[in-house]
Image (spheres, grey):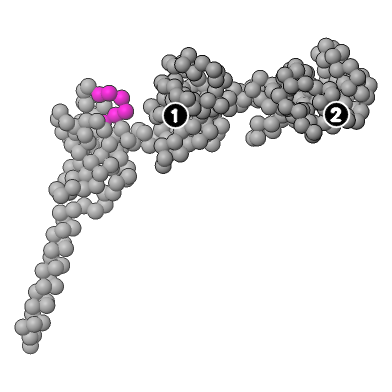
Amino acid sequence: MTSPSESSQIATSSFSMDDFAKALEKHDYQFQKGQIVRGKVFQLDHDGAYVDIGGKSSAFLPRDEASLRTVTDLSEILPLNEEMEFLIVREQDAEGQVTISRRQLEIQHIWEKVAQMQENSQSIPVRVIGVNKGGVNVEVLSLRGFIPKSHLLERENLEALKGQTLTVGFLEVNRANKKLILSQRLATRSSNLSLLQTDQLVTGKVTGIKPFGVFVDLDGVSALLHIKQVSQKFTESLEKVFQIGQEIKGIVIDIDESKGRVAISTRKLENYPGEVLENLAEVMNSADARANRVNSSPE
């Protein structure tokens, strides 16, 4: 026979299980913030839309979360009874209703798109919407991006860039911190790099002289003229041959697209060992004819 205390325990236990079952019925725990769900709009009103996403109660889509663009008529972008995807932005309230968004789902897709573009080293046109001391703010597929001053082609008059469309590459895409850093120079370099090929004669300006070689700017692409590629004769001092800002010509001997690096040679333009060291001006003046000769001669 069951004692009074045991009966009380059983009753309490039974009540707790029933209570838990009712709680499960009241709340649908399958829906979580950040989850993408499918549903159908069944009612529109001034403040938003009610959507059936399969839960115990309907989901609510506020008007401001309907789209990235300004919406005057919800029925244009939220047709009734048509299945669509939504992002849950707020979990269930006391009545079990979740809040959903189309706008934030669109933003999520844009971040995924720009991350893919960065991975593929793609360029994109952006519009300059603001200027500050450090660079310019731009609009990138409805997102806000930033181009540092050092990555702009025009660095003196930033105000003149307002409203302009620039072609840029991606330096940093960080969705967690909403950080989107872009570079106009990177896009220019990528574009110009794709136009280069080995054995091509190129013209550029000397931007740096180091003991191991000379750095040359080829219209946005940085090339290295290694000291061993200057002349067929031993080169004792590069600073005696070249000057910063000097325009020189050379033949492309190597292109590393993954690192954006190019190697050039002037020794291939020589008619005899040491000619570049003795008479650089003459070699440069007749570089086109010399390059044609080099490319047409058998290996």
Residue lying at the far right of the rendered structure:
272
Q: Is residue 281 above or below residue 66?
A: above
Q: Position of residue 276 (x, y in %)?
A: 87, 21
Q: Is residue 204 at all visible to an observer of this figure?
A: no
* 110 on left or right of 15: right
- The magenta segment is 66-71
- Reply above or below: 50 against 207: below
Residue type at numbered disc 1: Gly
Q: Which residue is mark 1?
A: 145
Q: Secondary structure at mark 1?
A: strand
Q: Position of residue 281 (x, y in %)?
A: 84, 14
Task: Depth check: give the residue in front, 201 or 210.
Answer: 210
Q: Position of residue 258 (x, y in %)?
A: 64, 35
Q: Residue at x 54, y 23 (%)?
A: 152
In the rendered image, the quadrant that contains the C terminus is top right
Q: Is residue 178 visible?
A: yes
Mark toward the start of the polypeptide (2 vs 1): 1
Instruction: Provide the residue designation for mark 2.
Output: 237
Spatial CA distance of label 2 from label 1 is 45 Å
Q: Is residue 90 magenta?
A: no
User: Callout 1: 10 Å neighbours few (<14), some, many (20+)?
Assistant: many
**Could you tell me the amino acid type at mark 2?**
Ser
> Label 1 near label 2: C-beta < 8 Å?
no
Q: Residue at x 15, y 49 (%)?
A: 94
